[in-house]
Each structure stands twice: as structure tokens, then as C-alpha cells.
Amino acid sequence: MNKYIIGVTTLFTSLLTAQQTEKQQGALDSIQKLDEIIISTNVIFGNKYVAKHRTGSAYYLSPKELQKFSFTDVNRALRTVPGVSIYEEDGFGLRPNISLRGTSPERSSKITLMEDGVLIAPAPYSASSAYYFPTIARMDAVEVLKGSSQIQYGPSTTGGAINMISSQIPAEFGGKVRASYGSFNSNQLHAKIGGGNSIFSYMVEYLNYGSDGFKTLPSGKNTGFNKNDVVAKFKTNLFPTAVTKQSLEFKFQYADEVGNETYLGLSEEDFNANPFSRYAASNNDKMTTDHSQYMLTHTLEFSKNLRITTTAYQNNFARNWYKLNDVTFNGDKQKIANILADTSTLSDHFNIVNGSANSAADALGIKANNRKYYAQGIQTKLDYHWYMGDTFHDVEIGFRFHYDEEDRFQWVDKYSISNEGAMTLTTAGTPGTNANRISSANAFASYITYKLKYNNWTFTPGVRYENITLQREDFGKSDVNRTGVDLATRENAVAVFIPGIGTNYKFNNDFSIFGGLHKGFSPPGNQDGQAPEESINYELGTRFNIGSLKGEFVGFFNDYSNLLGSDLAASGGTGSLDQFNAGEVNVNGFELLLNYNIARKGNKFSVPISLGYTYTNSEFQNAFGSSDGLWGTVASGDEMPYIPKHQFNTTLSIEHSDFEINLNGRFNGEFRTQAGAGSIPSNEKVASNFIVDISAKYAMTKRFNLTTNIINVFNNTYAVSRVPSGLRPGHPFGIYGGLEFRF
């Protein structure tokens, strides 16, 4: 398997070293065979060259691309990648909803998310909704893998995998400090330092960023957030004089967040009048989280051809989203999603929500969605590659033992509200009386892939095996001490083989075709007998160079035999997390990526431009009904919700040794908020939008830069979703200035 060191300070040095080594050996051409050299194991492919030569679709967001706009919002970063669909929620990218090639976008629950090659969703098997997402601002690179060769990465294999590469340990002493400040009192401080020698090396990093938010509450309370990230890495090369090389690397990461964020959106009328307002009843809504990760990686390198890497990991995540859940008027309790969907019929409830009426005691139910997540495991992979004449062979074998759990211990506090918007606690809830259960999963995963390169052909067959046992222990709302007197349990088990094969044929250095097929899989819920999500996925594409124009065109078709939906409060459902069978669905489309440098060679300026376009079409093959607001009642022929048919992205840069200017424009087509066919009803539609961002950097010295970022240059007002409950706006115009210092 192709592995590479990623890092701002080490990338080019590593590539140069690899090339020089192969030239000395005389066995390989240092450029054409670069993808066959193992350098690092926490990455999928590690640079653009390898991504462009896989037998499946792949995209590598390089350090340079991430630094152009100094991304803190992962939504803005990933929109540059064809095949990625996202619906926003908070305007800052704190909890993204990501879809790859038409997978269900809800909380990114149907894609495999990793950081440094390790599963990073809080409970990827038992509760896959990603309420924690790594901070993009501290990443060196992001890898997006789609297509047939993704079967190494599970549990979800239908749409693809995203691997975020955190800051790497530098080869030499150095570091950087970046600070910025701007609109809505938004601020960022990012500092890291590292270094070492041939025996011991280290890296320590700190990131703080936050904002007062761009929405307004009647009380004047800020609607923003504050988030901290700390990362420390230490590496030692064991027995440096031994023939067999060994190393040990330890990683610690901690993050916390306090955000005044809510599930409560706006009615159509209020959004049109003031899209950045918030209702008084959301005044006390708050998300508090903390996350920690421990990783210990042992690398055993027997030779340049054989390496075994073993990683033990533990992720801990705790969060309490304290937020308005329901409103009671004259004994009639209604969920906020129902109220916002029909403010006329439920006008008395709505007047309580917006704070225009005096309510009775206990009218507002504020739920403490208090949960703890725990995940741990150990994974090992062996990579062996060799040459036999002109034929290159590579075998990769991997195993993973994994356990994760979600512990819900929730309660509801009751409030009253005055017509001046003041909220008063009237009845304090008892922890554990709303939800009191533990969902867990034990999983064994393994895979074997084989890569064969002969002349212009490359073949990569492989198979993955998942054996999963999912359980739930529900202690009941009356047994808050968990004595087990009312314990209800359920269990579901699944074992599945996931085959796939990809191929690539290179006509010459300027033109190649690739394609493949593989089985898509996503784990079921813990209900006894529930089947997993399964599909057969096909792709066919080409990569080409025409003069200075480089591009990629890929068509894909995902044939679901059993699509699963999840009952999430975040998508307008009840919040049970139970999955339901959505039956047969076809998803097809194509992705286009073009890169061109307008400037001639030898010019002092470089003017690269990139264009990306994604077309996605979906169609249910059967009818069903669900309580999830994201799906609703579905008829055969309906389209999936929250998947735009058309997406377009373009980036234009002017680069000089002293400065650079970057412009990004992205068009997100209209999409449905409930499944349907034909023209989209206005109350079930999120309209299309076109947003432009600009960044600039000026080098005062070789080590000191001035930076500027402008978000939403034309200050377009647009909606991004209608879930969790009501319309939500995208980020308005914002301007931010900063300083960068490297040493």
C-alpha cells in the first residue's frame, strides 16, 4: 500500500530523499515509481501524485491548498473536492453533514472518518453520527478516497473515506505562530513547535479559536463558540544501529468546546424578515464538549520492502447539548420541529417560542442531551512489496479489533417564559429520567489487498471482512441508579465479506483510464435481525493532460439494495437513533476536475485555476414511510433529500514570491429537504446559492506574513438547511486580518 510522510516542513524533503535513494539503487525511475515506496503509514496516499495514480477516485487536499484560505470551516475546505456534498448547520463547520457520492449526509454517519488513519467518529459502529469532528485548522492535509480501492477503510464503504492528517513531527527544529481577528469578534491563535534528532523527536501544538457568532438573541447574549485544541507527539527510533528498524510514536490530543448553539431555526416568514435572528426560547441553549485521543504506534521495518505497523488507540468524547426540545400549551406538548413546520396551526406554541406571550410554568422543555462516548482498539497492517522483472507486486494485510459505546444519561428541565423573553426554571429534571441506556459494539475487521503493476496495467483486487456485534442496555427512566431492575436488552450481529477490484490503464504520461466495482456496506442498528446497508458501486473515469490543462472525469453508479436511514433529532426525527430500512435506491452521477495555469513558464507570476463540477442524481425504487423529518413519506421515483444535483467550485490564484491572492467561488444547487419528485415545493426547498471567498497574503520577510480573509464577499443571504428545526442561514460577510510567523 502506498504510504507517505505528510507535513509542511517535511514533505518536500521526504520526496527528494525517496527520489535520490531510488536513483542510487538504479532499480526504479524516481518519478514514475514514487507511489511504490513506503514512507509513512498514517496516510492513505500522501501526495497528489499518488492520488492521481490510484485505481479508484482519490483527492489530496495538500498543505498548500489548506493554507491558501487558512480554513477553520471544514465545509469550505471539502467543497473544493468533486463528489462531496455538504449541508451546513451552524455557519462555522463545527458539526458538518457530509455525503460522498450520494450517501445520507446526516451527521456524516455514512462515511468513514479518520484522523491519522484511526477511526475518529465518537462511536463509529454503535452510534456513527459524528457530533465530534476534528478541527480542520490544525490539519496538514486531507485525503478523500472514493471508488473501488477504498475497501481497506471501514466500517462504511459505500461513499468513501476521509482521512485527516494532523501536524507532523518536523525533521528539524522549527515552528509557527498564527493569529487572526475579525468580524463578530472572531479570533484564532495557532502555535506549534517541534524538532528532534535521529533518535528522538517531538511536536507540540495549541489552537484556540472562537467567535461571538453572527446571529442575535433578544437578550443580547452571544451566539458563538470557543474551542481549544492541544496536540502533542513524541517519537523515538528504537535500536538505531540494528538491522531491523523500529520506532515508537505517541500522540495525545485534547479538545473542548463551549458553544451557544441551538436546534431551533426560523419560520419562513421570520427568515425572510431577519435571517440572523434567534428566538427568545433558545436563549439557554448550549453545547459543551471535551474530547481526548491517545495513540501509540509501533513500526517494524524489516527491509525497504516489508513493514508492519501496529497502532493502539483510545478516543473519549463527552458532550451535553442543552437545548429547547418541546413546548407545551394547555396540555398539548409539541416538538419544536412540528411547531416551526406549521406556525399557523400551532400559533400559541409558536408565541411561546418567540417570547411574545407569557407562558405557564413548565411550558418549555429544555433537554440535556448528555452523552459519553468511548472507543478503543488495536489495528495492525503488514505491507510487503517486491519486483519480479518488470512486474511490481504489493500485498497489504490488515486487522482491527475495536470496541465503542454511547452512554446516554439525559434529563429535561422545565421553564416558563415571559413576553419580554425572560426564561425561568420552574422544574429541574432528574439526570437519567429522559434517556438512560448504553449502546455498544464489538467489531473485528480485516482486509487483504493485492496490487499488480505490469507495463501500463495496474490491478488492485481486495476483500474486507467485518464481524460486528451490536448491543443496547436500556435501564429505563425510573432506574437512574442503574440497578438493572427494569433492564431491557437487545442485540444484533452481522458478518459480511466486502469485495472490490479496481484497474488502471496508462496509455502514456498524458492519458489513462480507470474503473472498478466494489460492495458498499454500512453497519445496521442494534435491533435484532436488522440488515445492514448494502450496495454495489461502479465507477469509470479518465485522467488526462492536454498541454497545461490537467483533469479528471469520473462517472459513478451506486445501486443500493438496502439503504438505511437513521432517526436523528438533528434531521427532524425523534432522536432515538434507530435505523430504518429505506429499501432500494439508485444514485448516479459524474465528477469533473480541471486544473490549468494561465501564466507561462518562466513568468514571475503563477496563475493556477481549478474548476470542479459534480452532478448527482438519486431515485428511490420503492415506497416507505418514516418518522424522520429528513425523509418523510417516500414514493417510488422520489429523489433523496439534501443532495443537490449540481455543484460547482472554482479557485483562481495569483502567486508571487512576495504575495498571493486567492479567490474561491462555489455554486451549490437547490435541493429538497424531504424526498419527492418533480418541482420542489417552496416549503421543502433550500434554494441555490453562489458564494465567493477571498484570501491574500503578503510576505514582509521570509518568516513573517500578513494575511487577510474575506468570507462571503458579496454578503449573499442564503439558507443552508431546514433541519434540525426551521430555516438556518449561512455565514454572512466577514473580514479577518492576521499575522503569521515561522521559525
Image (spheres, rainbow, N blue to C red):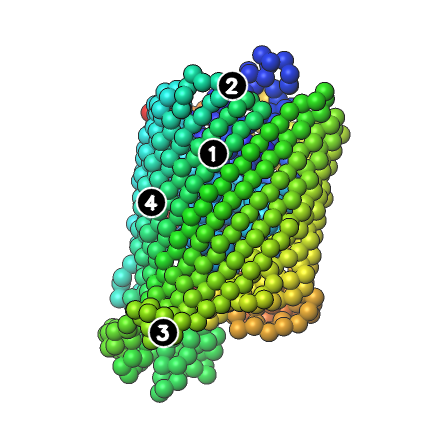
**Residue 395 appears in the picture as rendered:** yes
Q: Could you say which quadrant of the image residue 140 lies in? A: top left
Does 58 sit above or below residue 359? above
**Residue 519 shown left or right of residue 110 in the figure:** right
- Compared to residue 647, the image places residue 196 above or below, namely above
Dot in front, 3 or 2: 3
Gap between marks 3 and 4, in whole Å? 37 Å
Secondary element at tag 4: strand
Indicate which disc, 3 or 4, sits on the residue closer to the N terminus. 4
Sequence-wise, which precedes: disc 2 or disc 1? 2
Query: Where does label 3 land, which residue?
Result: 485
Foreground disc of the pair 3, 1: 3
Q: Residue at 32% x, 41% y: name it.
A: 230
Whether tag 4 and tag 1 are in contact, CB under 8 A, the answer is: no
Left or right: 285, with 26 as reference point: left
Image spot of residue 326 (x, y percent): 38, 75
Label 2 to label 4: alpha-carbon separation: 33 Å
Q: Dot 2 corresponds to which residue?
A: 17
